[in-house]
Image (tube, rainbow, N blue to C red):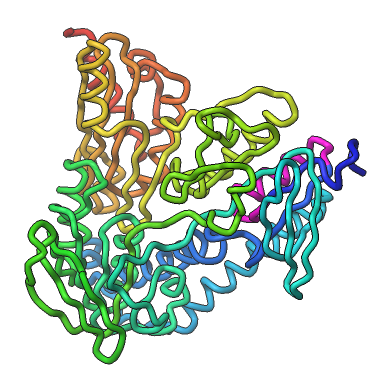
Amino acid sequence: MSKTNFDFDLIVIGAGYGGFDAAKHAAEHGLKVGIIESREMGGTCVNRGCVPSKALLAASGKVREMADVDHLALFGIHSAPVRFERQKIAAHANNLVSNVRNGLTKTLERAGVVILRGQGRLEGSQKVGLRDDNGVDRVLTAKDVILATGSDPFVPPGIQIDGRTVFTSDEAVKLEWLPRWIAIIGSGYIGLEFADVYTALGCEVTMIEALERVMPTFDPDITKIASRNLIASRDVDAKSGVLASKIEPGCPVKIELVDMKTRDFVEELEVDAVLVATGRVPRSKDLNLQSMAVETNRGFIPIDESMRVLVEGQPLPHLWAVGDVTGKLMLAHTAAAQGTVAVDNIVGNTREIDYRSIPAATFTHPEISSVGLSEEEATKLSNEDGFSLGVVRSYFKANSKALAELESDGLMKLLFRKDTGEILGAHIFGLHAADLIQEVANSLSRRQSVSDLSKEIHTHPTLSEVVEVAYKQAAQQLKKS
């Protein structure tokens, strides 16, 4: 029972990773918790994002590896022609989604969380409206409310979606068919991952990027080596500086490309399908935020470092927001961390979140990962705070494990302060980069110096020695400065 006169101690609107972790954490603290979800439990990550896409990447990655005759021949291995069943690859992803979603739901139920199906919204301070699937509307009360409604794929103006020939990642994870020629609009992590899947399964890909260079959000050094491996060496035609101003579904799909700067017509493409991977937008318009005078920034809900929702820069009592809808770092593990931080503050354990130490990964083959500041951001900080910026590069081609795997085309770039040795950021491309970045993220979160980190012993032979070499190179720079 609730310890107050409210229906619940906490109501969470949205059952993605942010909402799930918040609800579970609150229940473990003895709060009476209700969680509202209008779609599938698990939100984007479980149903339309991280989970199914990683299943597709795992399967297609094995196809790519087995089909790379030249690479296998270097080991003395000769494989038969590779065959795969698209339906079973799709079923693998679908089964994983179902298992994870069921596990998540049962975890909440065991914790005592009340799952409420329907559309949630604010109805003023400490009040939540709920319209269930049958259209029945009621108002619930809660001492605290957390908004965790996530995000949807962004579809730019001029692009028509039909879900079959022109679609977003929501449909792509179902892998309902394999177009012979697919255009991918956008070259961020979503576009790169699906290009990895499609090319492994025999599709021709045209990647269209509006900004001046492909992979614009990645470190330039990482982009150079990654684009060589993930784009140039594969059946991918990359176009940058052009905007897909108009896309019409059909057979074929027609794409009108214009110059990004001048808007002059460049060419028209006719392809079998188009994946629109141009980022994500927050799901906030149906939350009735005006009832609490909350003004969004392009739909994103403003919060402070404790996850409190802000109105004119000041925190509102009892209203919190976490996950993609806040627009901080739109990653599942960020949402989960924000959820637990919000609950800790609700129960009186004051906490803030350190976004700089949250890593990100792109699960291509090989992977890309990063944590902390970009070199541009670090340079700006060094100029503002008056310290010298250190930059070192550690190469996989000098690593015994990478050489043994015949996967030595990789790079780690480490950014640090030359006065204190504190790590500011790291960027990795190479085998298991998504795992390697965690060590750096942990060191960054503790604000450790490369002087201390360079003395730590790493297992030989492992890929972790790429990180060790970077730490030692950085420590040498400190001695010279």
Q: Is residue 177 above or below residue 429?
A: below
Please report the residue visible at 31 percent of the width from the left and 33 percent of the height from the top: 426
Q: Is residue 65 left or right of residue 335?
A: left
- Determine whether, in the image, residue 93 is placed left or right of residue 220: right
Q: Is residue 278 above or below residue 299?
A: below
Q: Is residue 261 left or right of residue 8?
A: left
Q: Residue at x 29, y 67 (%)?
A: 195
* Residue 70 visible, this orientation: no
Q: Quadrant of the N terminus?
A: top right
**Residue 257 seen from this side:** yes
Q: Which segment is the magenta one?
A: 13-31
Identify the residue at image location x=23%, y=45%: 410
Q: Quick check: 12 left or right of 232? A: right
* Residue 315, picture quadrant: top right
The image quarter in which residue 22 lies = top right
Q: Quadrant of residue 120?
A: bottom right
- The secondary structure making up most of the magenta span is helix
Q: Nearer the viewer, residue 68 or 268?
A: 268
